[in-house]
């Protein structure tokens, strides 16, 4: 990453930094809202009488709609104005939150959660695109993205704590009302502190492309989630194949349009495509490892969901610290090396997961997760800088939407693929540990999952149940060990890919000898003569 210096753009002033604080509000909310719901689900299910299928849709419809509309909303923001779309999203998110809090049936809650997902798709790309437009100086841009990631992870950290307090003193709907004050504050402060940007040369929104993008993304996300729950059966595989076919049709249409919904030329930039691959693959690994780790704490160690969540907080704190530290380190070292070092630390943490045992393994597990999360946090802000900074300013919303969509796919793929790998190892090892005397129908139940095994073991008498439970816990831990090892291998490849970006032309490298005043003057001259997205 060498071609240009960090002083190649004008430095942001007080208004931009206040604007960044304003953008932190929806970012914090989006992650906090998700983590709070995990705790609220049992309460709202009891209150509304939701069955197991309705509970799944209450959880999943948000991520379905979020993933499906990210590409559309990112491009729409480029066309109508990113601040405008952000404020529209804030109104919709606030209204849907109130409606969700006072839902009177599972169907109503599912519908309002769908609206929350669409509103979330308006908020996410708009916040990142505005950071790209507000901070012309790449060093400051990296700090802005680091703050964005820190707020996102901060929401994940605070969610279990805030949710636990709310649900202890109020009804389940209070978990949804939590977002309303955030949105009101954004609507009050946003118009004054946030600039407006839009691409004045963009054409009309192609509704056919919107439909094709939804037809491509939604079936794939659905298929991956179903595969994670029930294995690679006919329905999830068919959904994934159908989504892939629509994806090919969508891509062909984009190449023919003069104003495409998604500019595929972004992928020809090596820094953009490599960074996107790093984010996608690291997301797959971390999602799979986090899923199995959470199950380990509950099903193997025997902790309650709340206590298990508290043990996972250190990794979120490590990720916040790593995100904030990376821009400072990138001022002294080539950012590609910072990314590689972070991924190497993350790989070391994943390797440590191979040493977790079914008894007394909490300390090793948490240490491994802290290293993995803290390590992956180092490149994340820099990867965002590469992905969004590589795109022209008028395409910042589109680039941000691609990055966030990649993140959604990474989580879904990680849960489906590595979750399946963990189950395969679990079933293989369990077959070798089942004690004699366990009825065949109990064995069949125990093979389904560690959760089913814990329930089945409780129905067996004395030592027989204990032996089955110990064997199931050891088998599940073996699955976690294998997933950690696979993740470590993947991270070795990511280290090599990150180091390969050392000669990228993205302007994130410091220039110790440069004269800041002259650099700012040169940047202003260049900006004056170059085509740029206009502030409105």
Image (tube, rainbow, N blue to C red):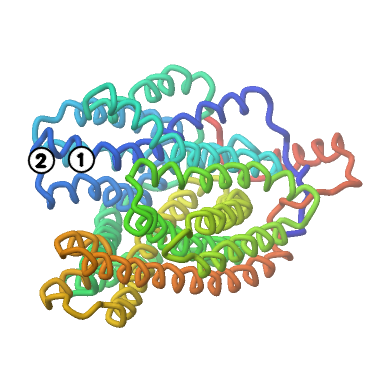
**Residue matched to label 1:** 42
314 with respect to 142 (left or right): left
User: Which residue is drawn at the image coordinates 49% and 68% (left, top)?
Assistant: 484
Whole-percent x and y of residue 248?
32, 71
Q: Which residue is mark 2?
A: 107
Q: Earlier in the sequence, mark 1 or mark 2?
A: 1
User: Given this view, does label 1 or label 2 mark the residue nearer the observer?
Assistant: 1
Q: Between 414 and 352, which is closer to the camera in this rendering?
A: 352
Residue 94, by quadrant, is top left
Q: Is residue 219 visible?
A: no
> Is label 2 in a helix, a strand or a loop?
helix
Q: Residue at x 61, y 28 (%)?
A: 16
Image coordinates for residue 374, horizontal then vertical, percent: 59, 51
Task: Choose between 500 and 137: the one closer to the eye.
Answer: 500
Of residues 533 and 347, the one drawn nearer to the viewer in this rendering: 347
Q: Quadrant of residue 291?
A: bottom left
What's the residue at 43%, 62% (across, down)?
359
Vertical position of residue 354 compared to residue 144: above or below: below
Mark 1 Cα-neighbour bin, 10 Å: few <14, some 14–19, many ≥20:
few
Where, quadrant-wise, is the N terminus in this rendering? bottom right
**What is the number of the mark on residue 325?**
none
Give me the C-alpha separation between circle 1 and circle 2.
Answer: 16 Å
């Amino acid at each position: 990453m060498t071609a240009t210096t960090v002083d190649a753009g004008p430095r942001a002033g007080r208004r931009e930094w206040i604007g960044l604080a304003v953008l932190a509000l929806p970012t914090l909310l989006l992650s906090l809202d998700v983590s709070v719901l995990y705790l609220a689900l049992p309460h709202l299910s009891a209150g509304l009488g939701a069955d197991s299928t309705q509970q799944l849709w209450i959880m999943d419809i948000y991520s379905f709609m979020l993933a499906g509309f990210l590409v559309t909303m990112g491009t729409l923001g480029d066309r109508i104005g990113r601040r405008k779309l952000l404020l529209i999203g804030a109104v919709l998110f606030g209204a849907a939150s109130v409606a969700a809090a006072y839902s009177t049936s599972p169907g109503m809650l599912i519908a309002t959660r769908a609206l929350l997902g669409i509103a979330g798709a308006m908020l996410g790309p708009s916040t990142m695109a505005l950071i790209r437009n507000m901070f012309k100086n790449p060093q400051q841009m990296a700090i802005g993205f680091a703050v964005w990631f820190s707020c996102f992870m901060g929401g994940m950290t605070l969610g279990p704590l805030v949710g636990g307090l709310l649900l202890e003193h109020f009804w389940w709907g209070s978990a949804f009302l939590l977002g309303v004050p955030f949105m009101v504050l954004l609507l009050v402060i946003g118009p004054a502190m946030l600039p407006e940007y839009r691409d004045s040369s963009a054409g009309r929104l192609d509704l056919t492309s919107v439909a094709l993008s939804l037809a491509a993304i939604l079936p794939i996300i659905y298929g991956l989630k179903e595969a994670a729950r029930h294995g690679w059966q006919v329905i999830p595989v068919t959904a994934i194949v159908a989504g892939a076919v629509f994806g090919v049709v969508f891509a062909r249409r984009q190449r023919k349009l003069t104003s495409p919904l998604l500019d595929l030329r972004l992928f020809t930039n090596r820094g953009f495509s490599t960074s996107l691959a790093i984010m996608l693959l690291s997301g797959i690994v971390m999602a799979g490892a986090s899923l199995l780790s959470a199950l380990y704490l509950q099903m193997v160690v025997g902790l309650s969901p709340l206590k298990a969540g508290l043990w996972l907080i250190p990794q979120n704190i490590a990720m916040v610290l790593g995100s904030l530290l990376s821009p400072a380190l990138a001022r002294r070292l080539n950012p590609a090396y910072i990314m590689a070092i972070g991924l190497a630390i993350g790989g070391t943490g994943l390797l440590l997961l191979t040493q977790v045992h079914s008894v007394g393994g909490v300390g090793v597990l948490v240490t491994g997760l802290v290293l993995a999360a803290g390590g992956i946090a180092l490149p994340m802000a820099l990867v965002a800088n590469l992905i969004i900074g590589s795109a022209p300013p008028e395409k910042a919303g589109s680039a941000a939407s691609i990055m966030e969509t990649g993140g959604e796919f990474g989580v879904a793929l990680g849960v489906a693929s590595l979750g399946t790998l963990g189950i395969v190892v679990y079933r293989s090892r369990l077959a070798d540990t089942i004690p004699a005397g366990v009825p065949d129908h109990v064995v069949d139940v125990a093979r389904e999952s560690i959760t089913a095994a814990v329930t089945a073991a409780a129905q067996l008498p004395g030592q027989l149940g204990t032996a089955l439970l110990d064997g199931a816990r050891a088998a599940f831990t073996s699955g976690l060990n294998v997933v950690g090892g696979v993740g470590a291998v993947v991270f070795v490849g990511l280290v090599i890919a990150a180091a390969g970006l050392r000669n990228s032309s993205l302007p994130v490298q410091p220039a110790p000898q440069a004269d800041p005043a002259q650099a700012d003057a040169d940047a202003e001259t260049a900006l004056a003569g170059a085509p740029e997205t206009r502030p409105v």
